[in-house]
Image (cartoon, grey):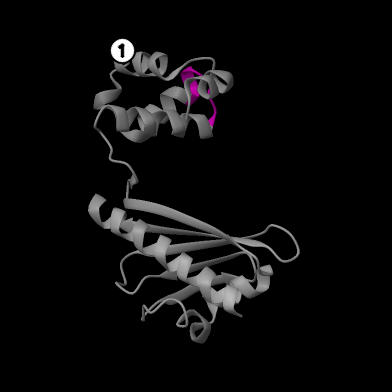
Amino acid sequence: MSDEAVKAKTGKVWKEWFTILDKAGARKMTHQKIAELLNTKHKVGPWWGQMITVTYEQSRGLRDKHQRPDGYQISVSRTVEVPLNQLFRMFKEEELRTGWLKEKGLVVRTAIANKSLRMTWKDKKTSLEIAFYAKGENKSQVVVTHSKLPEANTAAKMKTFWSSALDQLKTVLMGL
């Protein structure tokens, strides 16, 4: 995010926030304590408190890209020229899903029709959160978030995997 965007919303650019946090001893604070400091003392609000905290942690080598408290997380999205319900079914229904995603052993934990799915990945350790958005009558977007990944290199591999998988889904949908 640009300095201009941060300043427009918070009144300060990145360098100013990093200086404030360095002076406050944030290198030795937990993520929660940094966010709390930003929210209580600097009144940036919860979303900006998280954004500034994560960016600060990454800039100071305290957090890797895609790293979260419970592991690493990646997201990949695609917009396709199909109705929302058809896109949702391609994920929820195993027989349709196996036509474009060859992975076996996924478990659907929760499903809200045409809105979201929560699944356990085949490793039984990592999680998928899949969100669906209507972009018109016959156009939809899917966002796959894969979380609790154990390492940065695993996250990078899964980002590539999901990019390819969603491209394959798009190809299958175009052929229907």
Is 161 displayed left or right of 117 in the figure? left
- Helix, strand or loop for disc 1: helix
> Does the magenta portion include 61?
no
Residue 93 placement: quadrant? bottom right
Instruction: Work out whether residue 2 or residue 73 is closer to the camera in this orientation and state it.
Output: 2
Instruction: Work out whether residue 91 or residue 81 is closer to the camera in this orientation and state it.
Output: 81
Q: Is residue 25 above or below residue 120?
A: above
Residue 86 appears at what percent x and percent y? Answer: 64, 75
- Residue drawn at x 35%, y 63% is 161
Is 65 displayed left or right of 108 in the figure? left
For residue 76, say whether it is visible: yes
Residue 153 appears at what percent x and percent y? Answer: 23, 53
Residue 114 appears at what percent x and percent y? Answer: 65, 68
Q: Which residues are magenta?
A: 39-45
Residue 78 placement: quadrant? bottom right
Quadrant assignment for the C terminus: bottom right
For residue 151, say whether it is visible: no
- Residue drawn at x 32%, y 51% is 72
Residue 121 appears at what percent x and percent y? Answer: 37, 70
- Residue drawn at x 26%, y 27% is 60
Q: Is residue 22 above or below residue 159?
A: above
